[in-house]
Amino acid sequence: MSSNIDPTREELLWMYSHMVLSRRYERMMDRVYMEGKTPVFDMAKGPVPGEMHLSDGQEPCAVGVCVHLNDDDYAVGSHRPHHVAIAKGVDLDAMTAEIFGRTTGLSRGRGGHMHLYDQAKNFACSGIVGQGIGIGVGHALAIKMKGGSQVSVAWVGEGGANQGIFHEAMNLAGLWKLPYILVIEDNHWSVSVSKDRSTAVARNSDRAAGYGAVGEYVDKNDVWGVYAAAKRAVDRARAGEGPTIIEIQTHRLVGHFVGDPEVYISREQKQALTDPIVIMRDRLVAEGHMTEGDAERIEEEVAQRLGVAEEFARSSSEPQPADILESALH
Ligand SMILES: Cc1ncc(C[n+]2csc(CCOP(=O)(O)OP(=O)(O)O)c2C)c(N)n1
């Protein structure tokens, strides 16, 4: 479908500033994650142990959808969740502390970066690839049974869309006409397996017809295209017209995880990738929605906010073994 619904200036600036916030967040996370992990890469070391999946380049998939959502709408991210959490408004201090494994984190530091949970923003995510598809349908069923007007959105990679739960969940979403939107972030790679080696159809949005859903396809990581597709999908969901699959052609500008040697992608392929933030900034300036000065101010505000979040996490205490049986909720 074509992009024929234009964002307001306020929406454009919201999307842009949240893309910048998300990208700078990932750069900060890349830096703190690598602390203490070299010269021989050791995942268990440093202030943020474990695996780390960053979303650089995939920001349009988050902001173009979340700009239409309210706090009480449901959002379930994947194992690569930071951009969606930030766009859904998850508290940056508590999220950062959670990733650092500290007691002030969203779940008192017990979830880590792939298991962020914020009840105030109806946000969750999971390290089990594809799981969010079913959780999202569960949210949508709950909304319908309670007669609510919210929508439920889940994000999954094109690799995760090949999990069995995709078919079961989409079938029920279509059968029951649930207020459900599945966003497929097609970054072409499932770790090192390319989509053409794993998926029988060229477009996952074509699968929608098999489940009584509407399929939307967004090319070129286009934030305007995501905005328009998501607006149609949210309007349909709130009107009781059932589910939508939004497939977005996106790309990750970084490895699958921090430390990925990326031997499966050539230098030429990597160099050909474009940056959606640079594209959006240039277009906003060219169309008079924003000045270069506005862009600089956004960068400064973001840097200041991230400094506060990092300091909050670093200065928070580590969990104690004696507290393990206490609830993870604050
Ligand atoms: C059920 C399950 N199987 C395998 C894994 C290991 N794993 C983590 S990320 C990933 C690839 C996911 O690819 P995709 O869904 O395309 O998302 P992307 O990483 O590209 O964002 C795999 C196989 C897992 N976490 N969960």
Image: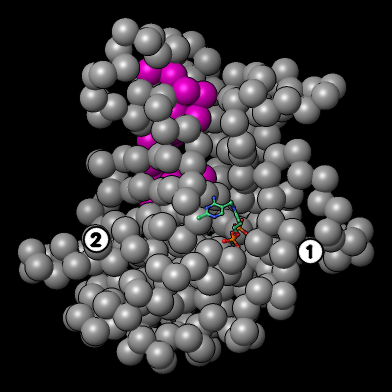
Residue beneath the point at 52% across and 49% down: 79
Q: Nearer the viewer, residue 199 or 2?
A: 199
Q: Tell me what residue is drawn at x 47 percent, y 76 percent.
A: 246
Q: Is residue 234 visible?
A: no
Q: Could you classify mark 2 by the number of other residues whose Cα lies within 10 Å: few (under 14), some (14-19), or many (20 or more)?
A: many
As drawn, 326 above or below 89: above
- Amino acid at dot 2: His
Secondary structure of the residue carrying tag 1 is loop
Tell me what residue is drawn at x 72 percent, y 75 percent.
Answer: 197
Ligand 1 near label 1 (Cβ, under 8 Å)?
no
Q: Please tell me in which quadrant of the rendered image residue 221 appears.
A: bottom right
Query: What residue sits 31% from the left and 40% below the top?
Result: 118
Q: Position of residue 68 (x, y in %)?
A: 35, 65
The region drawn magenta spans 81-103
Q: Could you say which disc has been placed on residue 139 in the image?
A: 2
Residue 196 sits above or below residue 79 on the image: below
Q: Is residue 19 visible?
A: yes
As helix, strand or loop, the secondary structure at mark 2 comes to: helix
Mark 1 lies on residue: 273
Q: Which mark lies nearer to you, 2 or 1?
A: 2
Most foreground residue, 177 or 73: 177
Q: Quadrant of ligand 1?
A: bottom right
Q: Earlier in the sequence, mark 2 or mark 1?
A: 2
Q: Main secondary structure of the magenta part?
A: helix
Q: What number is the disc on residue 258?
A: none
Q: Is residue 301 left or right of residue 147?
A: right
Q: Are marks 2 and 1 in contact (CB under 8 Å)?
A: no
Q: Residue furthest left?
A: 146
